[in-house]
């Protein structure tokens, strides 16, 4: 049994990760300031093996006892959140990552940073392999998130190369599942919320931009496989099935049985035109690949969440 620290453990991905780590017999220390996460996400995890620390990781963090793994997930993650919290997003990527790498150095834990496909920006290469350096607008509205993650990756490699910290970098592509917030602005929860109320589904632009959607159970399995490997360079984790946003909207309508129509809204600034991971490296290094197909994942999301939670308040 090992002791795992999960920052951002009360969030969407973090809570699923805590759950799987506990299921596999590990001890979990969840560190979260509840900025975008909630106690509701982790209330079912009450056990002697699970500890919650209400802490903002941009402040100094002290963690008692031996730690084997640090999964550093804390960060605003949806465009609505990071554009509401631009300085906090930059601070969590910089100071927050420094603090957690410091804990990893002190405890000799293996450190995983939850990076993102957004480090590739609006890519000129398709699908995106890990050795692509990206095409990011540093001063646009998404820059606070993209550059915070790029800085966090640079910091992680510097701690590894100069300080000998055992680190790895997960470049996570769009992931969905239960416990996403209905109003966080991301495509899957937005479409589900709209469809479950028979309201129009709002597609940006012509809906021809593509994304690849990974079901959360597949993703957290990949995070643990990466942490338990000896990889140090970035590894893409995501589902390589690619859909246009219009196809996603149609799949949500089909799965939910909604009578919704599709309406079109203005494209956000710097919205990437394509997004699809090349997961050859994850397959080869980790023996990992996603197993859940989009429509099955959408059904599971509805079943696990329940309509009430997907629709949310103020709808
Ligand atoms: P989320 O908003 O649900 O979770 C983030 C968690 O971090 C929340 O619980 C929040 O309260 C916590 N947090 C934020 N700032 C903090 C701070 N200063 N101190 C302590 N806790 C703090 O988002 P998510 O989708 O679960 O994303 C988790 C991580 O995965 C993020 O780092 C995100 O960038 C990365 N990621 C997610 C996706 C995705 O599709 N969900 C894709 C790429 C990368």
Image (cartoon, helix red, strand yellow):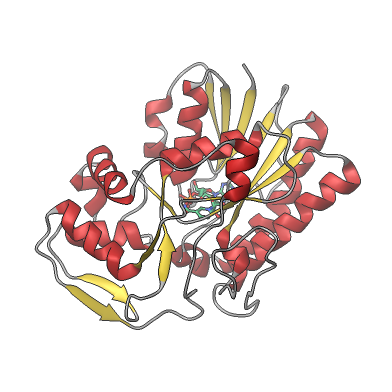
* Above or below, comparing residue 312 to residue 50 in the picture: below
Q: Nearer the viewer, residue 141 or 282?
A: 282
**Image position, residue 235 (x, y; %):** 64, 49
- On the question of residue 229 being in view, the answer is yes
Please indicate whether residue 224 sits to the left or right of residue 70 in the image. Answer: left
Please indicate whether residue 172 sits to the left or right of residue 65 in the image. Answer: left
**Quarter the C terminus occupies:** bottom left
| Corner quadrant of residue 265 | bottom left
- On the question of residue 72 being in view, the answer is no
Residue at position x 64%, y 55% in the image = 92
Please indicate whether residue 101 sits to the left or right of residue 76 in the image. Answer: right
Q: Nearer the viewer, residue 209 or 304?
A: 209
* Above or below, comparing residue 75 to residue 222 in the picture: below
**Image position, residue 137 (x, y; %):** 62, 78
* Above or below, comparing residue 17 to residue 179 in the picture: above
Q: Nearer the viewer, residue 206 or 36?
A: 206
* Above or below, comparing residue 58 to residue 250 in the picture: above
Residue at position x 24%, y 45% in the image = 299
| Corner quadrant of residue 29 | top right
**Image position, residue 171 (x, y; %):** 60, 53
**Quarter the N terminus occupies:** top right
> How many numbered marks appear?
0
**Image position, residue 291 (x, y; %):** 41, 40
Please indicate whether residue 111 sits to the left or right of residue 4 in the image. Answer: right
């Amino acid at each position: 049994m090992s002791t795992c620290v999960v920052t951002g453990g009360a969030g969407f991905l973090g809570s699923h990760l805590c759950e799987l780590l506990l299921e596999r017999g590990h001890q979990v220390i969840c560190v979260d300031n509840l900025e975008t996460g909630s106690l509701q996400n982790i209330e079912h995890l009450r056990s002697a093996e699970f500890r919650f620390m209400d802490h903002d990781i941009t402040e100094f963090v002290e963690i008692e006892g031996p730690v084997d793994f640090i999964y550093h997930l804390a960060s605003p993650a949806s465009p609505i959140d990071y554009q509401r919290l631009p300085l906090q997003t930059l601070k969590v990527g910089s100071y927050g990552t420094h603090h957690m790498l410091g804990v990893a150095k002190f405890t000799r834990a293996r450190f995983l940073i939850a990076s993102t496909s957004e480090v590739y920006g609006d890519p000129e290469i398709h699908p995106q392999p890990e050795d692509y350096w990206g095409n990011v607008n540093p001063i646009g509205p998404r820059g606070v998130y993209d550059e915070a993650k790029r800085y966090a990756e640079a910091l992680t490699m510097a701690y590894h190369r100069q300080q000998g910290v055992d680190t790895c970098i997960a470049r996570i592509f769009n992931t969905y599942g239960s416990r996403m917030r209905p109003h966080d602005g991301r495509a899957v929860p937005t479409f589900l919320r709209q469809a479950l109320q028979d309201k129009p589904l709002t597609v940006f632009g012509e809906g021809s931009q593509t994304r690849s959607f990974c079901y959360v159970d597949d993703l957290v399995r990949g995070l643990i496989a990466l942490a338990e490997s000896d990889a140090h360079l970035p590894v893409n984790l995501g589902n390589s099935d690619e859909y246009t946003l219009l196809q996603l909207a149609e799949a949500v309508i089909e799965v939910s049985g909604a009578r919704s129509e599709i309406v079109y809204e203005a494209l956000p600034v710097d919205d990437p035109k394509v997004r699809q991971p090349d997961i050859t490296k994850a397959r080869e290094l980790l023996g990992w690949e996603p197993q859940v197909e989009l429509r099955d994942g959408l059904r599971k999301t509805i079943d696990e969440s329940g309509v009430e939670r997907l629709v949310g308040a103020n709808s």
